[in-house]
Image: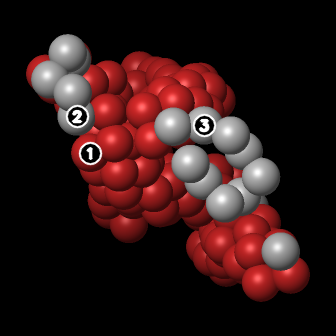
Amino acid sequence: MQTDGRQETPNERADRNWNELLQELRVMQTGVQILTGFLLTLPFQSRFADLDRYQVTVYLALVIAAVVATALIVAPVSVHRALFRKRMKGNIVTLTDRITRIALAVLALVITGVAVLVFDVVVGRTAGIVAGSAALVLMVLLWVLLPEALRRRG
C-alpha cells in the first residue's frame, strides 16, 4: 500500500496513473493536431511563395517537429497495445510518462516556432524572434517552473 494517503495496490495505482496520462495525452493531441493541420495548409496558400529562405527553413523544421510531436503523443497508445495483457502496466506507465515529457518539450518547440514564423511573416524578423522567445519563456514558466515550485512546496 502507498503512504500518500491512498489505499491502493500497485496495480490500482498503475491503472490510475495510466488513466490520468491518457487524459493528458488527449489534451496534447488536440493542440498538436490543430498546429500540424495549420502547418500542412501553408504551402497551399498564395503567399507561401513569398517566404524567404529563413522562413521556409523555419517552416520545414516546424513540420518535422510537428510530425515528431504527433509520433511521440501516439507512442504511448502503441506501447500499450504492444504490451497489453503482459502484466507490465507499471513499466508501461513509467515508459510512457517519459515519452510524454519528451512530447511536451517538442510541442513547446513547435509552439515557439509557430510564433516565430507567424510574427516573422506578418511583422518582421525581430518581432518573430521576440514573439518566439516570449512564447518559450511562458511555456518554461508554466510547464516547468510552476510545477517544480508546487512540488517543492508539497
Near-viewer residue (108 or 39):
108
When the figure is inspected, residue 30 is found, relative to residue 50, above or below; the finding is above
Circle 3 packing at 10 Å, graded few (<14), some (14-19), many (20+), is some
Q: Nearer the viewer, mark 3 or mark 2?
A: 3
Q: Are marks 3 and 2 in contact (CB under 8 Å)?
A: no
Q: What residue is shown with label 3?
A: 8
Near-viewer residue (66 or 28):
28
The label shown at residue 130 is none
Circle 1 packing at 10 Å, graded few (<14), some (14-19), many (20+), is few
Res 126 → quadrant: bottom right
Q: What residue is shown with label 1?
A: 91
**Gap in Å between the C-alphas at discs 1 and 3?**
17 Å
Q: Amino acid at mark 3?
A: Glu
**Gap in Å between the C-alphas at discs 1 and 2?**
5 Å
Left or right of 128? Residue 99 is left
Q: How is the image coloured?
A: secondary structure
Res 112 → quadrant: bottom right
Q: Position of residue 13 (x, y in %)?
A: 53, 38
The label shown at residue 88 is 2
**Gap in Å between the C-alphas at discs 3 and 2?**
17 Å
Q: Position of residue 4 (x, y in %)?
A: 71, 58
The reply to whether residue 150 is visible in this rendering is yes
Res 134 → quadrant: bottom right
First in sequence: mark 3 or mark 2? 3
Q: Amino acid at mark 1?
A: Asn
Residue found 21% across the figure and 17% down from its top:
84
Q: Are marks 1 and 2 in contact (CB under 8 Å)?
A: yes
Q: Position of residue 30 (x, y in %)?
A: 59, 24
